[in-house]
Image (cartoon, coloured by chain):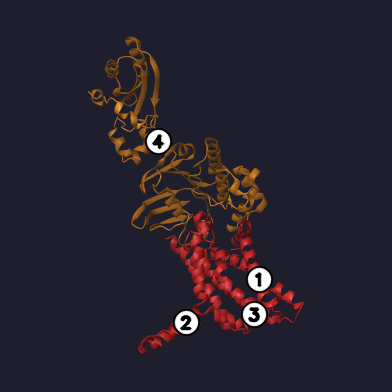
Amino acid sequence: MGAIFRREMGAFFASPIAYVYLTIYYLFAGVCFYLFTLSRGIADMSGLFSMLFWATFLLIPVLTMRSFSEEKMKRTEQGLLTAPVSLGSIVIGKYFASLAMYTIGVAIVFVYALILSAFGAVTWGIVLANFIALFLLGAAFISVGVFISSLTENQFIAYIISLLLIFVMCIIQSLAGFVENASVPDFFQPVVGIIAAGMNGLSFYNKFYDFTCGIFDLSSVLFYISCAAIFNFLTVRVLETRRWR
Amino acid sequence: MIEVKNLTKYYGDHLAVDNISFTVEDGEILGFLGPNGAGKSTTMNMLTGYISSSSGQVLINGIDILENPIKAKANIGYLPELPPIYQDMTVMGYLNFVYDLKKCKLPRKAHLTEICNLCKISDVSNRIIRRLSKGYRQRVGMAQALVGNPPILILDEPTVGLDPKQIIEIRNLIKKLGKRHTLILSSHILSEIQAVCDRVIIINKGKMAADDTLENLTKSVSNINRMTVRLDGVREEVLVAIRKIPGVKSVRADMERSGGIFDYEIVLEDGADITVMLNDMCRDMGLSIYKLANDEMTLEDIFIRITMGGDVSDDNKKNTPVINLVVSNGKNAGSKSDKLDENKGGEE
């Protein structure tokens, strides 16, 4: 696992991906920080954090699209899959490398908080809670991206599909609203209610929002971590079934 | 030791490998021979646990590759058809990665330096793999397989795409490695197998067509005794004269080499030597010999016969004198129409 993690991190920085990703992330965060905090002259960073939530579905696929697709395309996976290592440790190594890259991006919020602390009172608890929320969100979505990249050898397709899937996960609570208000015969109303409730329960945004308000809910933490565990498990299954075909 | 029992692989409905069984003893160099698409790579991928078999079993030093893959794989160094090298890394960076990946316990620096020297890549050890030539990349692939000093090496077409000088270098390396490792080597190039292997398995269309030592394979066909002689003179007269020599089974004239000079292909009876009589005949008839050659049946002949539908063992029993596929001595199929088949006369 360690070997794969180090090799992945090296590959990020040997290719333009790390630099492009970090540039875009920092640029986006910087613009949002200016627009929602600095230009208004307030010490509240919630505008920035909510924008960073929406940045995930565009930027996380950039990190994950190549993880397994490229290996498959260039046939280097043959080296990994014939090495005396378990499939799980291959997946986890790649997963944590992407997560580490993502965390390097998210950590910029501490720099902004530090800048802000020179001008006003920063609630460090809230900043930390938001950082944890963004980290957990990334942990869940990166596992989705890695999973998608294990399904195709085309990086572009991996990017688009991951983007769509993560986008749907981001807006699932809005979709729940549509389902709830759908005009269906009374007979179906309870069913619709259950579906909408289920969709709300799966909402990544609602749980994220709780964190940004400073509410630390263990069940939300477990939700994100289970999501990561499930998709990483699915990735292992994909690698395993591929050799049976 | 590698034991392969009734190994079969289906890709969907397509039967890629059909019931292959063999055993490779410690220290043996086994050649895996077959035309492209015969199932060589598929078999090797199953041996190394990259893909699973549809049925059958692979035991690596007694460990089942599917039941205990991590333990079994630790015994194998594998060079796939396309070396699994990361183009964005330096040679040393990559070998260090493989060292970590294989959880190697040998002293890192000494071990990797030794491998680099063995594969002759020390001078490029700090260069990015992307910028290396194909020959060097192949050698890096070989080095990768050697990391951790695995007792078994499996090399899939290690010389493909290399220039003749590089091929000789890789071949020498393989010979050297064969002294320390159990080795399976696949190729569709016969001279390669001939040069390094003790034992040959020929596979064709997913089936095993032959499994024997090189010596036995060549011996089994060496009683097919042929020679070629290039003479001037009137073709019909020469044919008749050659047929009269005792020991000649059949003769046929090949295409005209230049004005009035023909190649005559002679099939002899077992153990017959007609060189002296042929010389006497030429002197008597006033002919000149332009070329005289004993054609030995090569591995190439066996291979072509097997892979084109014929069966070596059957032919040997009947001791068929005429070899219809004459590819080994550089004659192409295009000259077939020029050939005068004189077999009937020869059998009189």
The one of A237 and B27 positioned closer to us in this rendering: A237
Q: Are marks 2 and 4 on the same chain?
A: no
The residue carrying mark 4 is B300
Give the mark toward the camera: 2 or 4.
Answer: 2
Q: Secondary structure at mark 2?
A: helix
The residue carrying mark 1 is A31
Give the mark toward the camera: 3 or 4.
Answer: 3
Q: Are marks 2 and 3 on the same chain?
A: yes
Give the mark toward the camera: 2 or 1.
Answer: 1
Q: Residue furthest right?
A: A118
Say which label, 2 or 3, has the lower sequence index. Answer: 3
Q: Which mark is residue A176?
A: 2
The chain letter for the residue carrying disc 1 is A
Say which label, 2 or 1, has the lower sequence index. Answer: 1
The residue carrying mark 3 is A46
Give the mark toward the camera: 1 or 3.
Answer: 1
Q: Residue furthest left?
A: B348
Identify residue type, mark 3. Answer: Ser
Colour assignment, chain A: red
Q: Answer yes or no: is residue A107 visible.
A: no
The chain letter for the residue carrying disc 4 is B
Identify residue type, mark 2. Answer: Ala
Q: Are marks 2 and 3 in contact (CB under 8 Å)?
A: no
Say which label, 1 or 3, has the lower sequence index. Answer: 1
A222 is higher (above) or lower (below) than A74: below
Residue A115 is drawn in which quadrant?
A: bottom right
Identify residue type, mark 4. Answer: Glu
Colour assignment, chain B: orange
